[in-house]
Image (spheres, grey):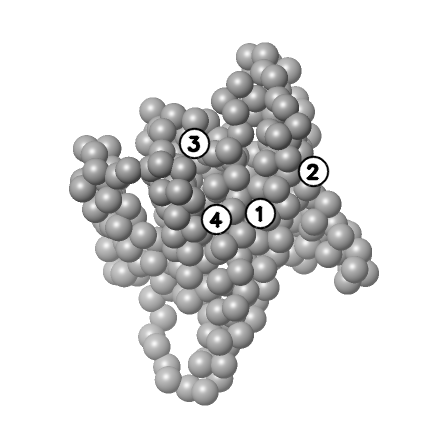
């Protein structure tokens, strides 16, 4: 069940990123992030009343707020890295470091992987790196080296903060259900909104991007729900690793919807991801 929930989280995260990417082609990043966060919060408030009753303490809300604030800042740093650096460096560095931070947190709270599961996690990390490559030929020019260096620091910071997001939700009590997602989404919204206000950026989106943003926000909050449920079913390391395979669904959607070509290195990454999931399941 944990594997299924984590893979559903990865699928929904990747789909949300795909729609969000389409929206940022029509509007700037910060407004898209803010309104998608609002859409996600609205979706969550509609869903919570139909879920089983839950009771959350101030501790659960505090962990949720920490997770959401870390995610909001982490995503902004990720987008900064993608904008200023080389995507084939920034994306895998961020995703892999998020898994490493989560795995370290999992070990501290008692995660103990079998040999098979450990091999599966290693393959999944390899898959993340391969899937995130764009397949473009490498050129050893000073400009590209500078771009890679510019994006590396935001990628490192984003990876750590997204790892904090993954880890923090594991600290919430299962009795709290999905209630910690409310302060998480509010904290993320506040963090992103504060950056937008500090930059005095207009919060306008193009009319053709509205529905993309709404659906991206809804998919993102469902991804959060699946991830939280996955952490409650077993080890944090497994949940965070499998959820971090979300780039796979993004590139598959780009292939189906936009006709983008899959590169051989990405196909190899998908194969590693599949084998990694099998090994984790066997473990």
Give the camera-side residue of 105 and 203: 105
Dot 3 or dot 2, earlier in sequence: 2
Give the camera-side residue of 23 and 73: 73
Relative to 96, is 65 above or below? Answer: above
Residue 210 lies left or right of residue 171; in this view the side is: right
Task: Tell me the residue that label 4 is attached to.
Answer: 163
Q: Position of residue 120 (x, y in %)?
A: 24, 44
Dot 4 or dot 2, earlier in sequence: 4
Q: Position of residue 185 (x, y in %)?
A: 65, 37
**Do the residues bearing badges 3 and 2 touch, measured as CB atoms within 8 Å?**
no
Task: Tell me the residue that label 3 is attached to.
Answer: 231
Q: Position of residue 227 (x, y in %)?
A: 46, 34
From the viewer's perspective, is the residue at label 4 or at label 1 nearer? 4
From the viewer's perspective, is the residue at label 4 or at label 2 nearer? 4
Q: Could you give the CA–CA distance between mark 4 and mark 1, rounded to whole angstroms? A: 9 Å
**Do the residues bearing badges 4 and 1 touch, measured as CB atoms within 8 Å?**
no
Dot 4 or dot 1, earlier in sequence: 1
Dot 2 or dot 1, earlier in sequence: 1
Task: Kindly identify which numbered label has been placed on residue 186.
Answer: 2
**Do the residues bearing badges 2 and 1 touch, measured as CB atoms within 8 Å?**
no
Give the camera-side residue of 111 and 26: 111
Task: Tell me the residue that label 1 is attached to.
Answer: 71
Relative to 18, is 195 above or below? Answer: below
Q: Position of residue 2 (x, y in %)?
A: 35, 28
Q: Secondary structure at mark 2?
A: helix
Q: Secondary structure at mark 1?
A: helix
Q: Callout 3: few (<14), some (14-19), or many (20+) C-alpha neighbours within 10 Å?
A: many
Give the quarter of the image for residue 81: bottom right
């Amino acid at each position: 069940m944990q594997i299924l929930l984590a893979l559903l989280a990865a699928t929904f995260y990747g789909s949300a990123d795909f729609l969000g990417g389409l929206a940022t082609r029509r509007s700037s990043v910060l407004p898209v992030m803010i309104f998608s966060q609002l859409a996600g919060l609205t979706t969550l408030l509609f869903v919570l009343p139909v879920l089983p009753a839950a009771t959350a303490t101030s501790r659960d809300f505090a962990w949720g707020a920490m997770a959401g604030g870390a995610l909001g800042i982490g995503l902004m740093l990720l987008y900064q890295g993608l904008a200023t650096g080389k995507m084939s460096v920034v994306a895998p560095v961020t995703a892999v470091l998020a898994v490493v931070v989560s795995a370290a947190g999992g070990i501290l709270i008692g995660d103990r992987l079998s040999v098979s599961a450990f091999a599966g996690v290693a393959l999944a990390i390899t898959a993340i790196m391969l899937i995130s490559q764009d397949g473009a030929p490498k050129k050893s020019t000073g400009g590209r080296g500078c771009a890679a260096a510019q994006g590396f620091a935001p990628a490192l910071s984003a990876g750590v903060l997204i790892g904090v997001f993954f880890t923090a939700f594991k600290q919430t009590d299962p009795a709290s259900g999905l209630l910690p997602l409310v302060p998480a989404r509010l904290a993320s919204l506040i963090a992103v909104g504060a950056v937008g206000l500090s930059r005095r950026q207009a919060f306008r989106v193009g009319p053709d991007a509205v529905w993309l943003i709404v659906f991206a926000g809804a998919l993102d909050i469902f991804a959060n729900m699946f991830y939280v449920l996955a952490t409650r079913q077993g080890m944090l390391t497994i949940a965070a690793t499998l959820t971090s395979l979300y780039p796979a669904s993004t590139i598959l959607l780009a292939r189906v919807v936009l006709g983008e070509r899959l590169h051989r290195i990405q196909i190899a990454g998908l194969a590693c991801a599949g084998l990694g999931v099998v090994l984790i399941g066997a473990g």
